[in-house]
Amino acid sequence: MNIILFDPKEIRDELLPLCFTRPVGDIRFGIMTIKEKWERALPGNYSWLTVDYLQKKYKFKKEEDNIFIAANVCPSLMLAAEVASLELYEALILNDKVIAYRGSYDTFSTMRIKKKTESQSEAVTIEHVWDIFMKNNIALEHDFRIITENRESQPVSDTVNIIGERYFPDGTPKLFIEEGVTMEYVNINLKNGPVYIGKDVEIQEGSSIRAPFAACEHSVVNLNTKIYGATTLGPYCKVGGELNNVIMFGYSNKAHDGFLGNAVIGEWCNLGAGTNMSNLKNDYSEIKLWNYRQYRFVKTGLQFCGLIMGDHSKAGINTMFNTATLVGVGCNIFGAGFPRTFIASFSEGGNAGFTDVIPSKFFQAAQRMMSRRNIELTDIDKEVLETIFHNTIDNRMH
């Protein structure tokens, strides 16, 4: 079966800046990315249908007979069965939107539909950037059950203090530990859900974790860290201080003291020592957040929202972020005081103002950071980032 995850344009624009550097299906949500969820739920040959400048990195493969799936929709057993049973030129509808379609690329692009079927599943979808942290508890428990099904956890050390029942009412364990984990003298509270500790993760002594929580492979939780759910650490992340309902996609660091809450952090980001952010306005009013699609601040209906940060952005020591700050790709933020709450991609500065990041300087820093994880900044990566840079400059001029 040839399966293509497509990016609905309005949804992709709602999920910027996180989707400047990736298709929607490459977002980490829960424990896995959305693509990884679908690969488990519906085996097949997967590819991507996204914006042109990302297609060199995220390949698109079409055949005469394809299944197209909206990449912002997460699979359930029922939804996967509905998609698998689609007939040729049949569309699956959820909330008046096409979430899956079977046919050729030409018939999909022209929406040649012979039959419409309403989905009966209660699918979890990402419609706005804040959905990633708001719905992370649901996605995390769903992924936990799939990843750990019919598998046996590594034993937990006697020095680890477990609070709450260790099993769900159906008998499923709430704590799962992969091979190679280092974890001693840690507090884990399982009252609100599961905790997943991935391969070769290190959780240092004195740390306290409240479920739901997931630490993906090779991530590190530093000494005396306090973590509230629902929080996900992607691969090779390092955290310290205090976190509350945070998703870090991967390879990003917040290694020192400071608060991060109701936040989504992309890949290759670094928050310096003492970096803090607000996730609640002093007057408790509804939060507004910058929206790329409407190109203005929009009401979110939220009372809590912290930092949304695109890939390759950095914050110097003691940086302070105000409630609902959105930072683009490749930014470098430093200095005293609060910077503005929308920082465009490839901006450098702080409260005193911003200038454009010099691309050559940015690539040198990115290469140095990535080489520490033995990962190369490829020519295709550079093309993607250069496109984002030029598009950002063009938008400023217009």
Image (cartoon, grey):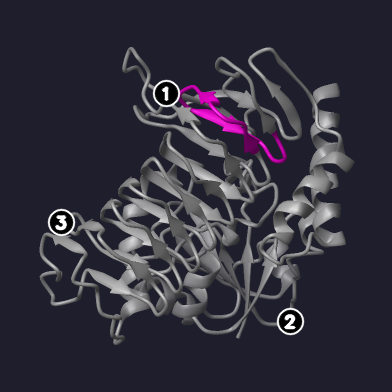
Q: Residues within 10 Å of mark 1 (few under 14, many from 20)?
A: many
Q: Residue at x 33, y 12 (%)?
A: 283
Q: Residues within 10 Å of mark 2 (few under 14, many from 20)?
A: few
Q: Is residue 107 visible?
A: yes
Secondary structure at numbered mark 1: loop
Residue under pointer 1: 287
Mark 2 or mark 3, whichever is nearer to me: 3
Residue 396 position, x and y percent, is 80, 24
Q: Does residue 174 appear to the left or right of 363 in the view shown?
A: left
**For the N terminus, which image quadrant?**
bottom right
Real-space Cα distance between discs 3 and 1? 29 Å
Q: Residue at x 39, y 57 (%)?
A: 124
Is mark 2 in CB contact (under 8 Å) with mark 3? no
Magenta region, residue range: 314-331
Number of the label disc, if any, that sits on residue 174 = none
Identify whether 94 is placed above or below 356.
below
Q: Residue at x 71, y 15 (%)?
A: 353
Badge count: 3
Residue 154 position, x and y percent, is 30, 81
Q: Does residue 189 appear to the left or right of 47 in the view shown?
A: left
Mark 1 or mark 2, whichever is nearer to me: 1
Q: Which amino acid does label 2 sit on?
A: Glu
Residue under pointer 2: 63
Q: Residues within 10 Å of mark 3 (few under 14, many from 20)?
A: some
Residue under pointer 3: 191
Could you tell me what secondary structure mostly forms the magenta stretch?
Answer: loop
Residue 205 included in the magenta stretch of the image: no
